[in-house]
């Protein structure tokens, strides 16, 4: 008999074994943290995904080449370096077995550098930035920010750059100059209040940003750089945290956590399955997807058509294949927030650590229907857990994903799912360690089952 406050140990009820991640769950979450740390921008995310796929036997294809594909081939193709499709060709004709597809997005809301960005004000150098997507602006204040992206050269070629050190900061205003901020709320104007400080202005006439890029890319001079696509990011690496190391804090969990699970599941997929298995990772989901490489582009349909053609499926092969295909749209879900629990629908309150969530919206902000939900829920059961469910409160507007766009473009049965998280669209979000492996496991099952 254990007396007093230790009696819970004898009862075996503390710490709750269910909430302590297993070694295998920790390993997947640690791998996700390093994946995200290596992926400060969509360019770097695609580079990291393709490096991992390359190590798993996938080869690169070019959209401008003729493709020859055989059963068991493992390949990937990228568009703009920010969207990509990777696939394993099945042993059966696609007209017979269809495509088994998982989609996610590589972009996250952030701050992006304007073309003529160098600013100076009150003795400080600053950079002009635009807000990309629905960023929670206040979360970018008082952070150690760095800069990464793509630099385009005079000859039209481009290189990736990551300055990878604390470089910039958007200082918040001292409370002494805004006494009501805690009671009236913080209002940030994206033009006036978000320009980060880059350093002290020493009145040198040279352009600080071009100098910085030139120093980071010794093969280039500042004059060679005629264009760039640069993002700000939080220089603080992701962390495994919480009382039992059961939580995960990082930027870009929406939606690099889903990219990580999708690519991991495809890389683990064998060469001998009958169906063609495929992952598509899109850029520009956070700004509406209507771009050359977004979910509303012909990118995925073009790849599917070329696979169908290369596997000699006949004139109706692609349409027959699409009629037998299924699509899992993987994007992060809103866990119930303990301080704002009433903002969730009473019967649909996904919890951190309880695994993937099936998201529904009868207005089709999510593409899930009863049948696609049932198929995914059955996979979760086989994987050893019960799927959580999410629907928005009826009096609140609903977010969306690449799921409905892809479903409308291809006419393929689709389910919208995602792991639960908090602080969505913050510069630093949070999720649960145990959920990473659950999503990896269920997507692996989705690819492997007949
Ligand atoms: Zn998302």
Image (cartoon, rainbow, N blue to C red):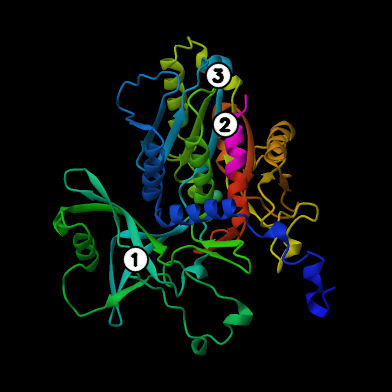
Q: Identify the residue under disc 2.
A: 447
Question: At 54% from the left edge and 15% from the top edge, which residue is drawn?
Answer: 95
Sequence-wise, the earlier of marks 3 and 2 is: 3
In the image, 293: left or right of 405? Answer: left
How packed mark 3 is, by other alpha carbons closer than 10 Å (few <14, some 14-19, many 20 or more), is: many
Outermost residue on the top side: it is: 314
> Image quadrant for the C terminus?
top right
Sequence-wise, the earlier of marks 1 and 3 is: 1
Report the span colored magenta.
440-450
In the image, 4: left or right of 446? Answer: right
Between marks 3 and 2, how big is the CA–CA gap?
Answer: 16 Å
Question: At 77% from the left edge and 55% from the top edge, which residue is drawn?
Answer: 345
Q: Identify the residue under disc 1.
A: 128
Question: At 48% from the left edge and 62% from the top edge, which residue is drawn?
Answer: 238
Between marks 1 and 3, how big is the CA–CA gap?
Answer: 48 Å
Outermost residue on the bottom side: it is: 176
Q: Is residue 185 above or below residue 428?
A: below
Of tags 1 and 3, the one toward the viewer is 3
How packed mark 1 is, by other alpha carbons closer than 10 Å (few <14, some 14-19, many 20 or more), is: many
Q: Is residue 443 magenta?
A: yes
Q: Is residue 97 magenta?
A: no
Question: At 72% from the left edge and 35% from the top edge, which residue is drawn?
Answer: 378
Of tags 1 and 2, the one toward the viewer is 2
Of tags 3 and 2, the one toward the viewer is 2
Between marks 1 and 2, how big is the CA–CA gap?
Answer: 44 Å
Q: Is residue 389 above or below residue 237?
A: above
Q: Identify the residue under disc 3.
A: 321
């Amino acid at each position: 008999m254990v007396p007093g406050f230790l009696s819970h140990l004898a009862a075996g009820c503390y710490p709750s074994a269910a909430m302590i991640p297993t070694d295998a769950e920790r390993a997947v979450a640690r791998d996700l943290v390093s994946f995200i740390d290596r992926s400060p921008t969509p360019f770097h995310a695609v580079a990291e995904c393709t490096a991992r796929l390359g190590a798993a036997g996938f080869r690169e294809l070019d959209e401008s080449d003729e493709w020859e594909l055989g059963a068991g081939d493992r390949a990937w193709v990228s568009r703009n370096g920010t969207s990509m499709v990777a696939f394993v060709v099945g042993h059966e004709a696609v007209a017979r077995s269809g495509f088994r597809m998982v989609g996610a997005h590589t972009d996250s809301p952030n701050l992006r550098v304007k073309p003529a960005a160098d600013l100076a004000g009150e003795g400080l150098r600053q950079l002009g930035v635009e807000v990309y997507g629905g960023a929670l602006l206040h979360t970018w204040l008082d952070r150690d920010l760095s800069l990464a992206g793509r630099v385009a050269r005079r000859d039209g070629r481009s290189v990736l750059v990551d300055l990878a050190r604390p470089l910039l900061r958007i200082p918040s205003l001292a409370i002494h100059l805004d006494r009501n901020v805690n009671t009236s709320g913080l209002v940030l104007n994206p033009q006036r209040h978000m320009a980060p400080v880059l350093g002290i202005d020493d009145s040198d006439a040279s352009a600080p940003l071009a100098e910085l890029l030139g120093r980071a890319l010794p093969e280039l001079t500042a004059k060679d750089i005629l264009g760039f696509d640069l993002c700000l990011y939080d220089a603080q690496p992701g962390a495994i945290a919480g009382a039992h190391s059961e939580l995960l804090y990082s930027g870009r969990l929406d939606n690099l956590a889903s990219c990580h699970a999708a690519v991991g599941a495809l890389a683990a997929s064998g060469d001998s399955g009958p169906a063609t298995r495929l992952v598509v990772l899109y850029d520009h989901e956070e700004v509406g997807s209507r771009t050359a490489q977004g979910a509303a582009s012909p990118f995925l349909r073009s790849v599917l058509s070329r696979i169908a053609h290369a596997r000699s499926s006949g004139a109706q092969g692609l349409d027959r294949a699409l009629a037998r295909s299924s699509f899992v749209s993987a994007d992060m879900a809103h866990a119930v927030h303990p301080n704002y629990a009433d903002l969730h629908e009473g019967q649909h309150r996904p919890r951190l650590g309880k695994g993937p969530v099936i998201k529904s919206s009868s207005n089709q902000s999510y593409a899930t229907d009863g049948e696609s939900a049932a198929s995914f829920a059955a996979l979760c059961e086989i994987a050893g857990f019960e799927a959580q469910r999410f629907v928005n409160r009826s009096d609140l507007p609903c977010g969306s994903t690449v799921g409905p766009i892809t479903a409308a473009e291809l006419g393929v049965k689709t389910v919208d799912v995602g792991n639960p998280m908090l602080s969505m669209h913050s510069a630093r979000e949070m999720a649960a360690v145990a959920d990473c492996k659950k999503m990896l496991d269920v997507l692996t099952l989705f690819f492997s089952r007949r």
